[in-house]
Structures are given as structure tokens and as C-alpha cells.
């Protein structure tokens, strides 16, 4: 179950990162989108190789929930897009950090457990970066009043 969710979320991160590259207004949102496309593409390739070695079947597409999240984000423009993207990245990476940790704690396979251990700080760093962008938004907004 976790692998299905993780696979779908990884694809979603790349798709949302592409939207941020195209539609982001703020430079930091575009840069973050670049990083998410680059880093999650690499993580997704590593993930696919791992599940193949573990002989596990995982869908190669996003689940309906992640597809809906991408559609909702794609419908937004301007500052509303940036704000929704940042909030989504915070929430998604917070959830992912927790789920990766839970999966790590119960994992039996050493290679899988090691991979999860490497991913947890990466995912948590992505959350922190998104939180920093949100904090920058708050500071910028308060300076305009």
C-alpha cells in the first residue's frame, strides 16, 4: 500500500513541479519547481529500480486523488497558484516524511529499509524549503501593508 501511494506521489511531485516552472510567478517558486522536477525524477527512477528488484507491482500512473490535486493546481493562476503550490508542497512533504518513517520502522527488507532511510531527510528538506517559501510570502505580504 505505501509503495503505491509513494509511487503516485512521486509522479505528482514531478507534474506539479512542471506546473510551477510554467505558471509560477515568484522566482523562488519556479526554482523550487525546477528542483522538484529534477530531484523527484531521480528519486522516481531509483524507486522504480528498487521495486523491480523487490519484485513488487506498483502502478505507473497517479492515483485519482493525486490527479485531482494536479488538476486543481493547474486551474489556478498568478499569486493564487504560487500560494496553493507552496501549501501543497508543505502538506505533501509533511505527510510523506511521516509515511516514509512509518514504512522504515516496519520494513523487513534491508535494501528497502536503507532506501527509506536515505529518502526521509530528502523529503523533510523539501518540506523545510517549502515552509521557507511560505514564510517569505508572509514577510513580503506584511511589508506591503
Image (tube, helix red, strand yellow):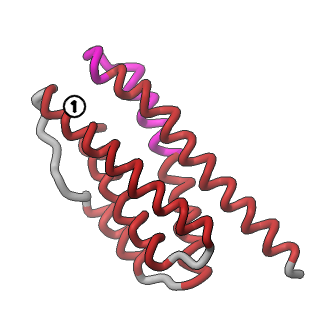
Q: Main secondary structure of the magenta part?
A: helix
In reply to whether residue 107 is colored magenta, the answer given is yes
**Structural crowding at the residue carrying mark 1, measured as other residues with C-alpha within 10 Å and reported as few (<14), some (14–19) or many (≥20):** some
Compared to residue 95, the image places residue 51 above or below, namely above
Residue 12 or residue 42, whichever sits in front: 42
Q: Residue at x 53, y 53 (%)?
A: 91
Q: Quadrant of residue 108?
A: top left
Q: Quadrant of the N terminus?
A: top left
Left or right of 122? Residue 52 is left
Q: Residue at x 39, y 68 (%)?
A: 18
Left or right of 141? Residue 48 is left
Tell me where residue 137 appears, x and y as whole percent: 72, 68
Q: Quadrant of the C terminus?
A: bottom right
Left or right of 127? Residue 48 is left
Residue 97 or residue 102, whichever sits in front: 97
Tell me where residue 45 appears, x and y as whole percent: 25, 43
Number of marks in the rendered image: 1
Tell me where residue 92 appears, x and y as whole percent: 48, 52
Q: Which residues are magenta?
A: 94-112
Compared to residue 91, the image places residue 16 above or below, namely below
Compared to residue 8, the image places residue 137 above or below, namely below
Q: Quadrant of residue 117?
A: top left
Q: Residue at x 25, y 58 (%)?
A: 63
Circle 1 sits in a helix, a strand or a loop, which is it?
helix
In reply to whether residue 47 is colored magenta, the answer given is no
Tell me where residue 128 appears, x and y as whole percent: 62, 46
Q: Which residue is mark 1?
A: 50
Q: Residue at x 32, y 20 (%)?
A: 107
Amino acid at each position: 500500500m505505501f509503495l503505491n501511494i509513494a509511487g503516485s506521489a512521486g509522479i505528482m511531485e514531478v507534474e506539479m513541479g512542471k506546473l510551477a516552472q510554467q505558471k509560477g510567478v515568484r522566482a523562488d517558486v519556479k526554482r523550487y519547481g525546477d528542483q522538484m522536477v529534477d530531484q523527484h525524477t531521480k528519486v522516481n527512477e531509483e524507486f522504480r529500480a528498487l521495486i523491480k528488484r523487490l519484485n513488487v507491482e506498483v502502478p505507473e500512473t497517479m492515483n485519482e486523488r493525486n490527479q485531482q490535486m494536479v488538476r486543481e493546481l493547474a486551474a489556478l493562476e498568478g499569486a493564487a497558484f504560487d500560494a496553493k503550490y507552496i501549501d501543497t508542497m508543505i502538506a505533501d512533504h509533511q505527510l510523506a516524511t511521516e509515511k516514509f518513517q512509518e514504512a522504515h520502522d516496519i520494513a523487513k527488507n534491508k535494501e528497502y529499509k536503507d532506501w527509506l532511510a536515505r529518502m526521509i531527510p530528502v523529503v523533510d528538506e523539501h518540506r523545510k524549503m517549502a515552509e521557507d517559501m511560505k514564510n517569505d510570502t508572509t514577510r513580503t505580504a506584511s511589508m506591503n501593508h
